[in-house]
Image (cartoon, grey):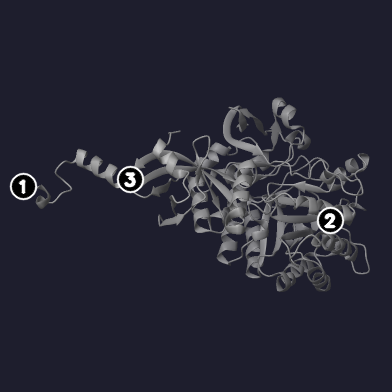
Amino acid sequence: MITLPEELKNILEKKETVKILGTSDKNGVPHVVLKDSMKLLDDGTLAYAEEFDSSKTSSNMVRSIWFDKLISVNIANGDTSYQITGKPLRCLITGKIFQQFLMSERKRDGGGPDIQAVWIIEPLEIKNQSRKARRDEETKKYPLYNTHLDMLKK
Amino acid sequence: MNNELTYQEAVQKYLHFPRFIILKLDLYRRGTIYSDAVEKEYGEFPGPMILRDGTSVVTAPAKKTNKKDPYTVDFHNGSLGIFYHGEYIEEIAFSPKPAFYGKKTSLGTPMEKIGMFRPQRLDIWPYRFCHYWKGGYQCKFCSINVIAKNRLKMEQGMELDPKDISETVAEALKEPGRFSIITLTGGADYEGAEPFDSELNRYIKVLQAIGENFSSKRFPSQLVCCAMSKKQLKRLYNETGILSYCPDIEVWDREKFSWICPGKDKYVGWDNWVKSMIDAVELFGPGNVCTNIVAGCEMAEPHGFRTEDEALNSTLEGAEFLAKNGVAMLALVWSPSRGSAFYGQKQPSLGYYLRLAQGLHDIRASYGVRVNTDDYKHCGNHGDSDLARLD
């Protein structure tokens, strides 16, 4: 399993960080949703709470774990942004980790949702999508490509 | 089980069928035994298992059912794994025991004698004797009274006290998120002014006792029982908070029903059984009336279907008829268990069960019949309803 960079681990812990999960259905149609319960577990996997067994995300995640399809996560805080490509590893409907997420979610905003599952995701590839990091990367790869002439004017 | 597809071969052949469900169905067919190390750690009856995708596997240990070619559950890199002929197949875990285990009711009854568990389902068997066995009318695949004899030996009694049940449910509800449904079932009891009034009255008492624990009138629950008359169904629906009614027809073909389930045929009859299910939809709503078949016993010898295609066509024809009327047919994998009349008989192939599961799911989906009370979580016994997770 790959290790998340420290910067990513740090923003994952922050309440205001935006966490987005992207999945796709049997026709390849993407489905992108906020999953603010997402966190990093001690074993280096990501976990989030699924509120509905009947949701599109839920059926897409089942399809992914059943047929080895990949999913995508974006974690963003201000100018810092990371994309994680991963695969669903487990769907927990009971047990310690499920209970922890359940209790945490139920406490939110004085009476939060009743979650149905906790999905565990194994990160396979991490890409820094921060604007500066991306600009530096593309410029290094293709020095005079993504630019207009007037930007090079004396 | 020679000359049949193994799990790996089935995964290669049925590429569009999820391999976790192929594994589940084959675990049911072949059975599982536990290694000595696992038995030492978890005991002889560690309970239901869960695959890592959330699929339940509810089987008895194979050494109790004398399966010839079982899978083995053993330790693997610090976790549990399923092995077949020494080859590691997949990760598995035992469902955690609920917190009420080890506690007693105010009558001194251990609560684990009252409530049995699955990953998200609480099972209660209020009555553990089947009257069909009197005079030899028991279903030919069933061994409930053999189990009952053992229960009597261990002084566990045949009938549960509603007070014990209510207190056990109250204790179970103290554990947040542990259960999503309560399922009741037991032996058939045709006694009463109208046949099965005795069974109905017992369940009404029990359901009212359970209902005391809930703030809503109706609560996620299923009753697996005999086929009731319309009058009895109205009493069941109006006097309790039950959500789903499930009279198991066991086998769809009329003649085979008569042969395999002589008690159900004698005391109810096939036509009345089907009528009961359709009548119940008016009260419980589409998808809240279910029926299970013991898939595969329709091929038992000497009077069963000769080919898998014939058997499949018959069952799916029945499933479609029922789905048109808002009733869901679901399948259990027949296990020719010790103590049953069919002990020692051969099960159909793994391919049969995959085709059946896909067929049942597709029929329900085409008629818009969702089975929320019998899905992967609220039951966990049916490969066909597991497939609905993709819907």
Residue B130 visible somewhere in the drawing: no
Q: In which quarter of the image is residue B223?
A: bottom right
Q: Are marks 1 and 3 on the same chain?
A: yes
Letter of the chain that mark 1 sits on in the rendering: A
The residue singled out by tag 1 in the image is A154
Q: On the image, numbered disc 3 is attached to which residue? A: A129
Residue type highlighted by circle 1: Lys
Q: Position of residue B119 (x, y in %)?
A: 68, 46
Q: Nearer the viewer, residue B273 or B202?
A: B202
Of residues B68 and B72, the one nearer the viewer is B72
**Is disc 1 surrounded by few (<14), some (14 to 19) or many (20+) residues within 10 Å?**
few
Q: Which residue is drawn at 70% across and 41% down?
A: B96
**Dot 3 crowding, Cα within 10 Å, few <14, some 14–19, many 20+:** some
Q: Residue B166 carries which label?
A: 2
The quadrant of the image that shows the N terminus of chain B is: top right
**C-alpha separation, residue under disc 1 versus residue under disc 3:** 31 Å
Position in image of residue B194 (x %, y %): 90, 69
Observer-side mark, 2 or 1, equals: 1
Q: In this view, does B125 lie above or below B39?
A: below
> Above or below — where is A90 with respect to B325?
above
Residue B243, compared with residue B297, is above or below; it is below
- Marks 1 and 3: which is nearer the front? 1
Chain of the residue displaying label 2: B
Q: Residue at x 44, y 40 (%)?
A: A10
Which label's residue is closer to the chain start, 1 or 3?
Answer: 3
Q: Is mark 1 on a helix, strand or loop?
A: loop
Quadrant in the rendering for residue B20: top right
Label 3: chain letter: A
